[in-house]
Image (cartoon, coloured by chain):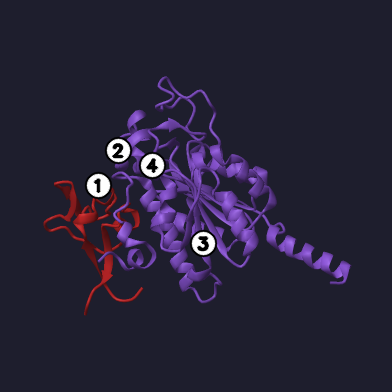
Amino acid sequence: MTGRKKLVIDPAWCKGCGICAAFCPKNALEIAGEKVRLKEGGECVACGACEMRCPDYALWLEDLEE
Amino acid sequence: MPSELVHKYLRIDHLPHIWCAGCGNGIIMRDVAVALQELIDDPEVPVSRDKTVVVSGIGCSSRAAGYLDFDSIHTTHGRAIAFATGIKFARPDLEVIVLTGDGDCSAIGGNHLIHAARRNIGLTVVTFNNDIYGMTGGQYSPTTPTGDKATTAPYGNLDRPFDIAQLAAGAGATFTARGSAYHARETTELIKQGILHKGFSLIDVYSVCPTYYGRKNGRGGPVEMLQWQKEHMVPAATYYAMSEEARRDKTLVGVLTHTENPEYTEQYAALVERVRAQSGK
């Protein structure tokens, strides 16, 4: 693991199951229109819990460009 | 452009997959991909992508062999372990990983399972165990708990369920473990241990099927079903620190049995050597 990470969401692969939002330790995600999105003012700490349990690979962490 | 892991180890032209929203299989397939990635990237470990074969049978779970971008084979119902045995026998240098479901592995393929375990052949079997036949419409499987409902058990299942890990251990498997869709990180570690173990390994991973099992049994949707796993399944470090009383309604996530016995293809190679020496050829 190097450097800081950022969350990337691809709604095209999201099936809206809500697992990511339910188990986000910062409660930073929500499902709107059957797709996941970062809540307004949602504080993502890039822990990766959502990526680990997303059955559809619709969100993940990427290295933050410095 | 999906994540680096998905881009590298899954066939992205086949994605998104066909599994239902909230199906645990997608989580478990990712665990397998992460486990393989971490072993392949570890210079201390002799696992390579070119020498890894993924074998599956039939059922929802078994679609995984089509999605994982390794040398893979999607075989007939229940015969994944039989095909895998042939591959391992012909090429003992390969890592052979079987992805299967509760029905594929313990009903249709039950005989292959017990005899592969008995031989202690060096396969790693990962069961995507969702307690039901999802693909064909929600019939009860050998792991459906007694009393639970299925399309073919509208008044509740009479049968007592198999514990696939115990079944494998009883038949001679030298490494058995239990994972869950919720406990993704722990399950990934168990899959890694199973791959590194020399001999027959089986990691029984509890998946979730919200579409059939969850709906027929009032277990809620995917979130409620994973929440149940979070509350009732406990990783080893915590589990062994709990009192016996507290463990009573809990299921261990971790290694169940681990023993060392001669591996079958090594024994076969030794037999060949011995017979050659005796015959002077």
Which disc is residue B53 wearing?
Answer: 3
Q: Amino acid at mark 2?
A: Gly
Q: Chain of mark 2?
A: B
Q: Chain of mark 4?
A: B
Q: Nearer the viewer, residue B171 or B237?
A: B171
Residue B169 in the image: state x and y as whole percent: 63, 46
- Relative placement, left or right, of B23 versus B259 is left
In the image, which lettered chain appears purple?
B
Q: Amino acid at mark 1?
A: Gly
- Closer to the N terminus: mark 4 or mark 2? 4
Q: Amino acid at mark 3?
A: Val
Q: Are marks 2 and 1 in contact (CB under 8 Å)?
A: yes
Residue most extreme to the bottom: A66
Residue most extreme to the top: B155
Give the residue pinned by disc 1.
A18
At horizontal 50% and vertical 35% (from top left) the residue drawn is B143
Q: Are marks 3 and 2 in contact (CB under 8 Å)?
A: no
Which disc is residue B221 wearing?
Answer: 2
Q: Label 1 crowding class (10 Å Cα cut-off): few <14, some 14-19, many 20+? A: many
